[in-house]
Amino acid sequence: MTTDAKKVRRISQIRNGTVIDHLNPHRVFEVVKILYIDDTTEETVTVGTNLQSKVIGKKGIIKISNRFLTQEEVNRLSVISPNATVSIIEEYEVKKKFKVKFPQEVRAILNCPNPNCVTSIEEIETRFKLVQESPILLFCTYCERYCRENEIEIL
Ligand code: CTP
Ligand code: ZN
């Protein structure tokens, strides 16, 4: 390999598993959390952030070996990273590729920004309805507050 080729080598390809690409670089670690990746995870996981992308400037990427995420699982991250793409890898080949889609309802993973909301006070699962996709606007079904993308916080 030439020196130049070494310089541009990026995160390794994976043999089997899921690649989540084109993540919003400001929210990669929240995505990690939503996917329940933590210190107890046994599989190899690589997380990259602020990587250069020709299309979107900077981006994040997460590669999880031997775990095959479903469309439903990845849809949960659409509210914080709507442009993410997901590739399912089998024996080094991209077998399936899909975009995250907005669920009509988001349960349990987001905080309501209203400190007076019952979900902020009591142990109740939060629930938001999707009002608008671009820009994102959610609606808390408990306190009826509207919530913009920059107010959305992961529990
Ligand atoms: N990938 C991987 N391991 C493999 C095959 C692919 O980690 N064995 C990753 C690639 O690095 C890329 C993603 O899976 O981040 C999708 O692969 P591919 O479709 O080959 O790449 P691109 O055409 O560049 O995809 P896109 O247009 O979505 O950026
Ligand atoms: Zn609320």
Image (spheres, rainbow, N blue to C red):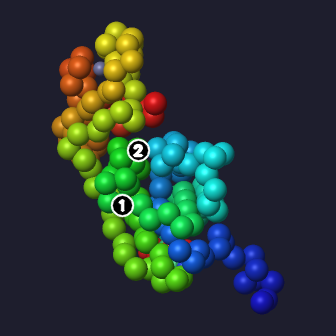
- The quadrant in which residue 115 appears is top left
Tell me the mark number nearer the camera, choosing from 1 and 2. 1
| Residue 70 appears in the rendering | yes
The three-letter code of the residue at mark 2 reads Ile
Residue 126 drawn above or below residue 78: above
Q: Secondary structure at mark 2?
A: loop
Apparent side of residue 71 relative to residue 13 in the rendered image (left or right)? left
Relative height, residue 86 to residue 5 (above, below): above
Q: CA distance from mark 1 to mark 2?
A: 18 Å
Numbered label tally: 2
Residue at 65% of width from left, 74% of height from top? 12
Q: Which labelled disc corresponds to residue 70? A: 1
Q: Residue furthest bottom?
A: 1
Height in image: 104 above or below 62?
above
- In which quadrant of the rendered view does residue 6 lie? bottom right
* 104 relative position to 97: left or right: left
* Residue placed under numbered mark 2 in the picture: 80
**Between discs 1 and 2, the one toward the N terminus:** 1
- Residue name at image x 31 percent, y 54 percent: 72
* Residue for point 48% across, 79% down: 90
Query: Do the CB atoms of the residues marked 1 and 2 lie less than 8 Å apart?
Result: no
Height in image: 128 above or below 46?
above
Residue 132 point in image, percent of width and height:
20, 41
Residue 19, position in %: x, y? 49, 66
Going by the numbered disc 1, the residue's amino acid type is Thr
Residue 35 coordinates in the image, percent (x, y)? 48, 49
Determine if the C-beta at disc 1 is less than 8 A from ligand 1: no
Q: Residues within 10 Å of mark 2 (few under 14, many from 20)?
A: many
Quick check: 130 left or right of 55?
Answer: left
Choose between 58 and 67: the one closer to the eye.
67
Residue 11: give x, y in percent of width and height.
65, 70
